[in-house]
Amino acid sequence: MQLGVNVPNFGPGTDPGVLREWARTVEGLGFGLLMVSDHVAVTPDVAERYPEPFYEPFSTLSWLAGITTGLRLGTTVLVLPYRNPLLVARMAGTLDRLSGGRFVLGVGVGWARQEFDALGVPFAARGRLTDDHLSTLRDAWAGEAGESDRRTVPVWVGGHSAAALRRAVRFGDAWHPLRLPLARMRSVLAEHPMPGFAPRIALRMTTTPVDDPERPAGVGTLDQILDDLRRLRDLGAETVVFDPYHGDPEETRRPQEAWQTLTTVATHWRSA
């Protein structure tokens, strides 16, 4: 099972130097995947949690591809209805080729109504649009001719609604749930066989055990976090992505705290 990190590509403490150091830290600790988030118009509902500067994911990952080597790079998650699907197919395919096949396209329907309005995309149609766009992506990649090394970019489908689960089965290479309790993920996988399983979990280490039955995976003592990883591996997870951001933009000014937690988890996981 490979481990990855969702790196903040936004916030007052984030700049090119910090992003470069994030990449060096993630790769240096032996993590196999670095992922970033997506917003296009940082409207008030977005800015409350993910403020400017917000670095556009395809541009950011293309730049990081040039300063990393074996590290996979991905989106968690690209809001698929925001962009023309043929444009997404071209950008994703290009980034995958330029990086040597290292790109993972995580996708979702989005949640920020004001951002949808700013982009002129109907919020109520976002689920249908996501399905249509995924179908177009698959057709576009399948229709590319004349390339002996043609490959399809891996698609991870986020969300845990009934529609999202159907979408993951129909279009995805993996289900990519975000910050769910372990019991909820186990229940979904028991009822809905998935093509793959690659969850994004929180990363918040505590000094005392967290006993809440709704505890999200990745929240708790070091022993609880390591146990979560073992249980996710037993559920068939090919990759687990840690998300060390907890919603306060000021955290982006103190990335060293997240780096230390990641170091602790990575060190103990390798020796477990």
Image: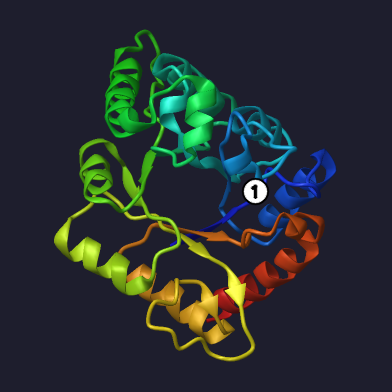
Depth order, front residue of 208/231: 208
Q: Quadrant of residue 242?
A: bottom right
Residue found at the very far left of the displayed protein: 191
| Residue appearing at x 43%, y 20% in the figure | 89
Task: Pinpoint residue 11: horizontal percent, then vertical percent.
Answer: 73, 46
| Residue appearing at x 79%, y 50% in the figure | 21
| Residue appearing at x 18%, y 65% in the figure | 190
Depicted 234 relative to depicted 118: above or below:
below
Depth order, front residue of 168/51: 51
Q: For mark 1, what is the residue?
A: 48
| Residue appearing at x 81%, y 50% in the figure | 13
What amino acid is found at the position of numbered circle 1 in the picture? Glu
Task: Pinpoint residue 126: horizontal percent, then vertical percent.
Answer: 35, 31
Depth order, front residue of 145/59: 59
Q: Which quarter of the figure is the N terminus placed in?
A: bottom left
255 with respect to 167 (left or right):
right
Task: Pinpoint residue 119: horizontal percent, then vertical percent.
Answer: 52, 22
